[in-house]
Amino acid sequence: MDYSQEPPHSQHLIIQAKEPFNAEAPTDALVEFAITPEGLVYCRNHGPVREFEDSEYCLTVKGNRKEVKLTMEDIRSLFPKAGIVATLQCAGNRRNEMGVIKKVNGVGWDAGVLANCSWSGARLKDVLEHVDIDVKDINHVCFASYATLCQDDDFYGASIPLEYAEKAENDVLLAYEMNDEPLSAEHGGPLRLVVPGHLGARWVKWLDTIVLSPDESPNFYQQRDYKILPPEIETKQQAAAVWSKYPAMTALPLNSVVCSVLKTSTTLLVKGYAVPGGTGNVKSVEVTTDEGRTWHAAKITYQEGKWSWTLWEAELAGVGETGLVCSRAIDESGRVQPKESSWNLRGVAFDAWGRKTY
């Protein structure tokens, strides 16, 4: 693969792999912004980043022996522009912490592989209605990018159930703007999928093909990756025989992270983020400095709609010179973030209490 033609990458990120380029934001910087600036939006790639001419870019929509092509001009002019604030999060966020339990497979990530951004574009619902494909016997909407090379398959692909696409009909977007600016090549421009509530692996970048299908996407990243395998599966060889037995991941779990700790002479100022799982938005965040014997309510400083992250902070008095501060999130259904996270081979969906020493 040729990585020599990539556009410049942000200088504010921590590089975890160079080819393909994978990098994350420092968490202390990340939580200083409710809406993540582009320079702090993480980069997750499975191949080279390519730049495309907007005027030449085309989206193909297929299903039940029908095929329609839409240019970027079509997408902007035929459909009302919709916008949402939603958190994009990699399934491997905090993978390095799971790797402490036992070795995992995948890019080593800390806790900065997420970004809360404003996304604008055409609603998937509107595009599908315009194309007017008969949905009889259709169960899945498959998305693909053939635009750039990929490590493990001939293209990058993912799918979501048609039922989810219809349920979240106003929120699944074909986005061409991020934070009110044209979507850059670095983050999938000129067109990417936005699926609030689903892990980032489903948010296909450089989107050029949509297929309405009875079946899930056959792509490697839908069928043989981004799945939570049971802990007894410890090698790639063991995994090869069981991928098909486990469902593709959708929502990531309820989570919180301690991102910065500032010690003064009398207090401890703690900041962090929390993200919802699939059972309701974050309702509260608590912190502890005694391994959970005593919990203190954190102040929520930002939350916008049901798809955004939650920023929080807490000021604690009477703490020692050094120690450990932990966080846990609680959602609207009463679900509580667990103290420990179970292990899996791919190191995905790590959700143990947030922890940071001071």
Image (spheres, rainbow, N blue to C red):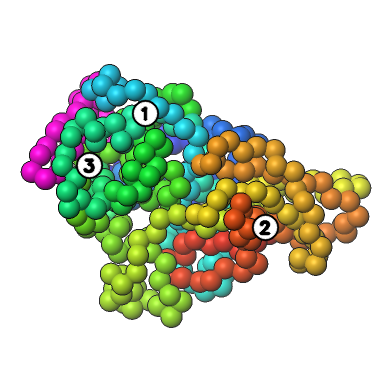
Q: Which residues are magenta?
A: 50-73
Q: Is residue 238 above or below residue 6?
A: below
Q: Is residue 328 above or below residue 344?
A: above
The image quadrant that residue 5 belongs to is top left
Residue holding disc 1? 121
Question: Mark 2 packing: few (<14 Cα in 10 Å), some, or many (20+)?
Answer: many
Residue holding disc 2? 328
Residue drawn where x is 34% and y is 69% of the image? 246
Residue 130 position within the rendered picture, expressed as x and y whole percent measured from the top left: 21, 30
Let me know if residue 13 appears in the view: no
Question: Mark 3 packing: few (<14 Cα in 10 Å), some, or many (20+)?
Answer: many
| Residue 11 colored in magenta in the image | no
Mark 2 and mark 3 lie on one chain; the one further toward the N terminus is 3
Q: Amino acid at mark 2?
A: Arg
**Left or right side of 152 for 186:** right
Residue 78 position within the rendered picture, expressed as x and y whole percent measured from the top left: 26, 21
Q: Amino acid at mark 1?
A: Gly
Residue holding disc 3? 210
Q: Is residue 46 above or below residue 49?
A: below
